[in-house]
Image (spheres, rainbow, N blue to C red):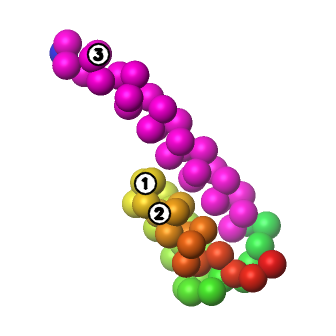
Amino acid sequence: MNQIIEYLPFIIPIIAVEFILMIVSLVHMLKHKKFRFGNQAMWIIIVVFVQIIGPILYFTIGRGEE
């Protein structure tokens, strides 16, 4: 239990960044319907279930042209 408390200052910012990335990418997906690869349902599943890597993949690979 003490080990978890020691790592808490590192874990909380990572969780916050992951949550913010997920929310921003989901809002972007709902506003923009164009994707370079795949469709909206696929990207929602990837962003929600693949944690930090999912939103990063969406912004680098999946986001369509504005």
Query: Which numbered disc flags the more N-terminal residue, 1 or 3?
Result: 3
> Taken as a whole, is the magenta stretch helix, strand or loop?
helix
Q: Do the CB atoms of the residues marked 2 and 1 lie less than 8 Å apart?
A: yes
> Which residue does the image show at 58% across and 78% down from the upper left?
62
Query: Which numbered disc flags the more N-terminal residue, 2 or 3?
Result: 3
**Place of residue 40 in the rendered image (x, y in percent of width and height, measured from the top left):** 62, 76
- Number of marks present in the image shown: 3
Instruction: Give how far apart the Cα atoms at labels 2 and 1 are.
Output: 6 Å
Q: Which residue is mark 1?
A: 51
Q: Do the CB atoms of the residues marked 1 and 3 lie less than 8 Å apart?
A: no
Judged from this view, the residue extending furthest toward the bottom is: 37
* In the rendered image, the vertical position of residue 51 relative to residue 40, given as above or below: above
Q: Which residue is mark 3?
A: 5
Instruction: Give how far apart the Cα atoms at labels 2 and 3 are.
Output: 27 Å
Q: Which residue is mark 2?
A: 54
Kind of residue at disc 1: Gln
* In the rendered image, the vertical position of residue 26 relative to residue 46, given as above or below: above
> Which residue does the image show at 65% across and 76% down from the upper left?
63
> Which residue does the image show at 52% across and 63% down from the upper left?
56
Instruction: Determine the secondary structure under disc 2.
Output: helix
> Where, quadrant-wise, is the C terminus in this rendering?
bottom right
Question: Position of 34 compared to 60: left or right?
Answer: right
